[in-house]
Amino acid sequence: MATPPTIGVRNYDIPALRELDVAHHLPAQSSYKLQQDLGGSRIITHAQGSTIYDGEGHAILDGMAGLWCVNVGYGRPELAEVAARQMEELPFYNTFFRTATVPPIELATKLAGLLGGKLQHVFFNNSGSESNDTVFRLVRTYWGLKGEPNRTVFISRHNAYHGSTVASASLGGMTFMHAQGGLPIPGIEHVMQPYPFGEGFGEDPEAFATRAAQAIEDRILAVGPENVAAFIGEPVQGAGGVIIPPPGYWQKVEAICRKYGILLVSDEVICGFGRLGEWFGFQHYGISPDIVSMAKGLSSGYLPISATGVSSEIVEVLRASGEEFVHGYTYSGHPVSAAVALRNLQIIEDEHLVDRVREDVGPYLNAALQRLADQPLVGEVRSIGLLGAVEIVAEKGTNKRHGTGGQAGPIVRDHCIAGGLMVRAIRDSIVMSPPLVITHEEIDRLVGIIGAALDASMEQLAAL
């Protein structure tokens, strides 16, 4: 047990809360049978910096920054203060009916400056899923107003994650999500992902980049360029397993989109706000998208908010039509969320966290992960900025998996959590996305716990 911070920490009846969790609470993306069998969820009660604390008093290094989002770390009083101040002044008003409040106007202006170039307009939502729902409707509306209503098809990638609403889960390429609810909806095509370890093992990186990009062009030609509206992709696939594309891939993808006049959408829900060592992933890769979806690090998870950055060309078409864009949410541009997001961006700037990821902790994480490369179970370690992954294999020097595949990650993850580190298992890999404020000492501890978890898992994995 660790001694947690005590300021503002309440005493909870954890056993009673776990019972109520089973009786009434349906957690997100969960097996409700497993929730019941375990007697309730692990209850997180408070947090500070890069560490979370559960109801049993365990201190757990948060290697996932919540859910890829707590970029500035936990326990920021300045974010609580700005939320309280805005709640006192104006807790809510909507952005329907030609009204607006001050914080979203200021936040949109700030984001336009960070996005740069043609991305000068911002639509606010509440989650990354909603941001990509907005992308879906906006793109189709744009092409209809341009007099090309047949351009309705989106091209995405297998194993991509773009959210869990009907439209965003359909845009994503995860078959286990499509199996629930009769997805994907029509008009979405999926092509291969640029996953060197899984789908290009041993292949020349440039040749693999060409092959993965060519799959997009081949699908465009198969569907008919006149029917394709947009290509959407995460700069680095996060929930897919921290899939880092080979050099040159994104330049090839952008060239294909321009060749056929297709909109390029960069899903920055995970990669945005410093995660890759630039404000946005598209800046890291040197491309110029037409639309950008954002969430998570926008407020560091302190309040729900997301945004969709839109090019001036698209907005001019909407304006010229004179039609209403009949889309939006009650809480679009919520003034408290927007005020917190604006202050969060100021913290990132004031503390030079983007530069810190690029020049300091990102390279440090990369070097630290290399210490795991010789471990018998490790097929590959990879990282970019503060995103990292450890691939678990059954045979060193190959990408052969244990058992039927997909079982190794959860086993190693559970040992990590027992050792005091929260990471995520994605099939046969362990992935991480720590707060941008993580220290060198915490990175060393993170890697050490993963190493110990790998060692502790060897017997279980051998039995698969």
Image: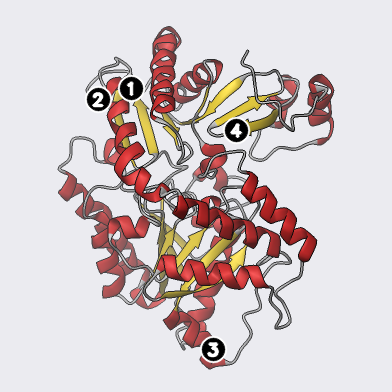
Rounded to the nearest angstrom, the CA distance separating label 4 from label 1 is 35 Å
Rounded to the nearest angstrom, the CA distance separating label 3 from label 2 is 55 Å
Rounded to the nearest angstrom, the CA distance separating label 4 from label 2 is 40 Å
Packing grade of label 4 (10 A; few <14, some 14-19, many >=20) is: some
Label 4, on which residue? Answer: 48
Which secondary structure lies at badge 1?
Answer: loop
Dividing the picture into quarters, in which one does residue 22 lie?
top right
Dividing the picture into quarters, in which one does residue 224 lie?
bottom left
Q: Is residue 7 left or right of residue 280?
A: right
- The tag earlier along the polypeptide, 4 or 1, is 4
Name the amino acid type tagged 1. Val
Asked whether the viewer can see residue 185, the reply is no
3 or 2: mark nearer the eye: 3
- The tag earlier along the polypeptide, 4 or 3, is 4
Q: Is residue 323 above or below residue 437?
A: below
Quadrant placement of the C terminus: top left
Name the foreground residue: 415 vs 101. 101
Give percent across and percent down for residue 454. Answer: 40, 15
4 or 3: mark nearer the eye: 4
User: Which numbered tag is attached to residue 393?
Assistant: 1
Give percent across and percent down for residue 236. Answer: 37, 48
